[in-house]
Image (cartoon, rainbow, N blue to C red):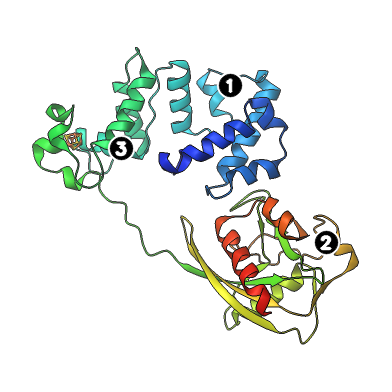
Amino acid sequence: MLQQTRVETVLPYYARWLKRFPTVAALADAPLDDVLKSWEGLGYYARARNLHRAARLVQERHGGSLPDDPEALRALPGFGEYTTGAVASIAYGRRLPAVDGNVRRVLSRLYDLPAPTAAELRETAAALVPADRPGDFNQALMELGATICTPRSPRCAECPVAEFCLALARGTVAERPGRKRVGALPLEIVGTAVVRDAAGRLLLVRRPATGLLGGLWEFPGAVVGPDEAPEAAARRAALAAGAVLAPDAAATAIGVVEHTFSHKRVAYRAFAFRGAGAAAADAAEPSGAGVAPGDPVQGGGRHPATGRTWADETALAELALPVAQRKLARLAAAARPRL
Ligand code: SF4
C-alpha cells in the first residue's frame, strides 16, 4: 500500500484491510471483487491484484508463510527490488538495501550524485546496510528522507548525518538529486454514458483483468475520436456495451469529472441517455455479450470490456469503482430527478 502512497492516506485502509483479510489464506480465498472493493480509492490497483495473486502463490508454493529467501520473494507478483529488499530486511533481517524515493534523495545528497541510476543507488545503499538490524537501518534511511532530508527545505542543521554529507559541504543540496524532466501530461477526453433501464438501474461495464484499473467497474465510455462529439462517443460506448437506445434517445450532459493518472489526464464527459432499455438477457450478471471486441473503452482505448451489469443503488455501492467513476455515479444520482 505504501508504494506511491503516503502513510496518512494508507493507515485507515491498512486497518480495514487487516480486519477483512487477517491472514494470507483469507486473502487468497477472497474473490478478486472483494479485494478491489477494499482497495477502492487508494489507486494503482495493480498493487491490489498483485497482492491477491501473491497470496494465492504463497498458499500454493509456501504453505501460507511468506518465504524469507529473497529469490523466492522476488518471484512473487508485485515484488520488485524495493519491495523485496524492504520485506527481506524488515521482516527477516536479511542484509539487503531498500531504495525508495526518499532513500534516493538522501543518498544523492550524501554522496553528491547528480544523476545516479537505480543500479548505482542500489549498490551504494547495499554497501551501507549493516549486518546487524538491516531492516531498522533501511527504515531509518527512509524516515530521514521523509522527515529531515525533504525535497524542499531540508533541515540540515538537525540532520544526524550532516557531517558526512558531500552535497552540504559543496553547497549543492538544492540541486540533488537532479530533477527528472516531466512534460505536461496529455489530456484524453472520454465520452461517458449514464444509461438507466426502466427499473432505474445503471449500466456498468467491467474493465479487463489486467492493465490500467484492471477488473474494476465503470460507466461505458469511449475516447473521443478526431472530429467526434463527446456525446457521440458516449452513445457509441453505450451501444457497444449492449444498451438498447431509442433512435431518438436524447442525451443530457450531466457534468465532467477529471482525473490525473501517472501518465495522462482524463476528462470524463458524462451524458445521461433517456429512452434507454436493455435486451432481456442483459439483466444477467456480467456476460461480456454485447461488447464489441476491440471497441475502445475509457481510460485506455485499447481493451475491450470483459463484462457488464445493471446495478441498482445497493449493487452499485458494492461494486469496486475507481475514484473518478464513483464521482460519476454521484453525478448520475444528482441528475436523476431532472431527467
Ligand atoms: S545534511 Fe542536509 S542534505 Fe545532507 S543528508 Fe542531511 S538533510 Fe540531507
Which mark, by number, is residue 146?
3
Query: Residue 242's image quarter?
Result: bottom right
Q: Residues within 10 Å of mark 2 (few under 14, many from 20)?
A: some
Task: Judge from the rendering whether residue 115 lies leftward or rightward of residue 27; answer left or right.
Answer: left
How crowded pointer 3 is (Cα within 10 Å; few <14, some 14-19, many 20+) is rated as some
**Rendered-image quarter of ligand 1:** top left
**Residue 111 visible in the shown view:** no
Give the labeled residue for mark 2: 289
Q: Secondary structure at mark 3?
A: helix
- At horizontal 72% and vertical 39% (from top left) the residue drawn is 31
Label 2 to label 1, Cα distance in Å?
40 Å
Q: Residue at x 80, y 82 (%)?
A: 246
Q: Give the numbered dot on residue 177.
A: none
The C terminus, quarter of image: bottom right
Report the mark closest to the observer, 2 or 3: 3
> Could you say whether the residue bearing mark 2 is in a helix, strand or loop?
loop
Q: Is residue 153 left or right of residue 320?
A: left
Please state the horizontal and vertical placement of residue 73, each as a whole percent of the image.
Answer: 55, 25
Disc 1 versus disc 3: nearer the observer: 3
| Left or right: where 125 falls relative to 89 | left
Q: Measure the alpha-carbon separation of dots 1 and 3.
A: 28 Å
Q: Secondary structure at mark 1?
A: loop
Confirm or deny contact between disc 1 and disc 3 (CB under 8 A): no
Three-letter amino acid code at disc 2?
A: Ala
Ligand 1 within 8 Å of disc 1? The answer is no
Total count of labels = 3
The amino acid marked with disc number 3 is Ala
Viewer-nearest residue: 229 or 198: 198
Give the distance between the C-alpha atoms of the residues marked 2 and 3, in whole angstroms.
Answer: 49 Å
Earlier-in-chain disc, 1 versus 3: 1
| Left or right: 287 as drawn, with respect to 194 | right
Q: Position of residue 111 (x, y in %)?
A: 20, 33
